[in-house]
Image (tube, rainbow, N blue to C red):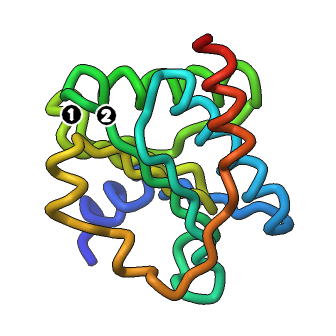
Amino acid sequence: MTAKKAKIESVRPAATPRPTRDDAAEAKEVALHIAAAGLDKKALQVEIIDVRGKVDYADYVVLMSGRSDRQVNAIAKGIDQTLKHEHDQRCYGMEGLPQGHWVLMDYGDVVVHIFHQDTRGYYDLESLWMDAARVDTTDLEDAADLADA
């Protein structure tokens, strides 16, 4: 290795590792906070999938949809702000803004997919985890319905 290359290698910042939570209960709580924040922005078809033991990159996957590109973007930004300010949770990566067809958010052990309705149907991620357990979001949806009334 040349001296110049060695110097460049030593200056590069180390990649920030994705943190994992100590237990699955904490990851589930984060997933529920994400779902609630999405529902606050009128997300549709909110689903939390328990993928522990099925994939190595997450414990939970949260799926939701928006009616338009603008709503998809608003949902993503709303989740980011709510989790950051109310739950002290940092988003480690976000892709898909400003296009708004499919936004992917990384919260460590929880991965969030926010789709435009048409895009969600096309990719059908739910079918990848047909045999995975679902987390009940009925209470969150009922609370969101009461807030709308």
Q: Is residue 83 above or below residue 102?
A: above
Q: Residue at x 56, y 67 (%)?
A: 49
Q: Which mark is residue 41?
A: none
- Binning the other alpha carbons within 10 Å of mark 2 as few (below 14), some (14 to 19) or many (20 upward) gives many
Q: Give residue 18's position: percent from left, percent from top.
A: 58, 59
Quarter of the image where the C terminus is located: top right
Mark 2 lies on a secondary structure that is strand
In the picture of the structure, the residue carrying the numbered disc 2 is 66
Quadrant location, the N terminus: bottom left
| Mark number displayed over residue 100 | 1
Q: Residue at x 24, y 54 (%)?
A: 120
- As drawn, which residue projects farthest toward the top? 149
Amino acid type of the residue tagged 2 in the rendering: Gly
- Contact, CB < 8 Å: mark 1 with mark 2? yes
* Viewer-side residue, 55 vs 70: 70
Say above or below: 61 vs 88. Answer: below
In the image, taking residue 100 as reference, residue 42 lies left or right, namely: right
Residue depicted at 26% across the width and 67% down the height: 124
N-terminal-most mark, 1 or 2: 2
Q: Amino acid at mark 1?
A: Gly
Give 51 or 66, whichever is nearer the viewer: 66
The residue at 23%/44% (across/down) is 117
Q: Residue furthest front?
A: 149
Gap between marks 1 and 2 measured at Cα = 9 Å
